[in-house]
Image (cartoon, helix red, strand yellow):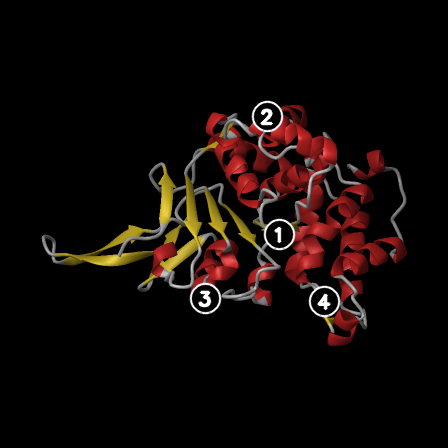
Amino acid sequence: MTPRAELSGAPTTGACDAPETPGVDQLHATVQRIAANVEQVLVGKPEVVRVALVTLLAEGHLLVEDVPGVGKTSLAKALARSVDCTVSRVQFTPDLLPSDITGVSVYNRRTESFEFRPGPVFANIVVGDEINRASPKTQSALLECMEEKQVTVDGETYPLSAPFMVIATQNPIEMEGTYALPEAQRDRFTARVSIGYPDLKAELAMVDEHAGHDPLADLRPVADAAEVQGLLQAVRRVHVSPEIRRYAVELVTATRQLTELRLGASPRSTLQLVRAARAQAALAGREFTIPDDVQAVAIPVLAHRLVLTSEARAARRSTTELVRQLLSRTPVPRGDTERERG
């Protein structure tokens, strides 16, 4: 059985050695290098790149959802190639099996024992192309690894390498032969981003720069796995005041009280919202969070987790619109952010 995957580098199961934790200035400089690298491929979409980097720094997973041809896979591959670490790509298809992702135990006649052969999920960055084309059984193979950063096969548990990030793409328009992601799967994605069509200036620049060659072919890493591990350590040290934590909890709780929703945001989304706010603060060069950080990540983190009622869908309401309304209605904490750092 040969997994449908393209592996770059040998998979490892141990965590990489993290260097000394960098300061916020060093973090900002490293992230800016990664962003500039990705923007060579994805022209005119700095906001999309920001969300992708926030997700990376928040130790989360990214769902890229949009129509064909706008650069979903290019974004995923550009981010993966910007970090010198193990990378794998899986093309999801209806006949893909869970073992094609996680790996399989194979009998070795020489040793008369079973040996585990790791699948493509054993990499630092896993790119899952068109994830909704695989069956729910195969999609569920990602549940354990995305939440617990480990894989269990035949009763044996194997830890995944760190850092670990899943970047999945899906097309929400072409639904023939697809399987919608269940709520449990969507909830494991820290953020969802839609790229959208470029504006006239950006599309002209794309034609001028990319018509003759593939920019991905020229992309070179600007950071490595050890550096990313250091960045993650730095983000964990970003201060979140009790007022900001309460603000995040109130936003998530408010989603559960909306009559337009059949399912509000989960407690997991509260944790992801706070982590993403930390990452946003670090991205802005601060060692403490402010309400603006929560507001900047609220829609990418919360909107894809909400389930509209049939009446709300008939009225053409959107979860993005509902989150935006909650942001305008929820009281924003006031105070001296410099004082809150302590």
Image x and y of residue 322, in percent: 80, 60
Instruction: Name which of mark 3 and mark 1 comes first in the sequence.
Output: 1
From the image, tell me which residue sits under label 2: 209
**Element carrying mark 4:** loop
Q: Residue 310 versus residue 268: which sits nearer the camera?
A: 310
Instruction: Name which of mark 4 and mark 1 comes first in the sequence.
Output: 1
From the image, tell me which residue sits under label 3: 135
Disc 3 from disc 2: Cα separation: 38 Å
How many neighbours does mark 4 have within 10 angstroms: few (below 14), some (14-19), or many (20 or more)?
Answer: many
Nearer the camera: disc 4 or disc 3: 3
Q: Are marks 4 and 2 in contact (CB under 8 Å)?
A: no
In the displayed structure, does residue 275 sit left or right of residue 1? right
**Mark number displayed over residue 264:** 4
Residue shown at 67% from the left, 34% from the top: 203
Q: Residue 82 versus residue 235: which sits nearer the camera?
A: 82
Query: What is the quadrant of residue 57 in the picture?
Result: top right
Q: Amino acid at mark 3?
A: Ser
Image x and y of residue 299, in percent: 74, 52
Instruction: Name which of mark 3 and mark 2 comes first in the sequence.
Output: 3
From the image, tell me which residue sits under label 1: 67
Q: Are marks 1 and 2 in contact (CB under 8 Å)?
A: no
Residue shown at 38% from the left, 42% from the top: 14
Disc 4 from disc 1: Cα separation: 26 Å
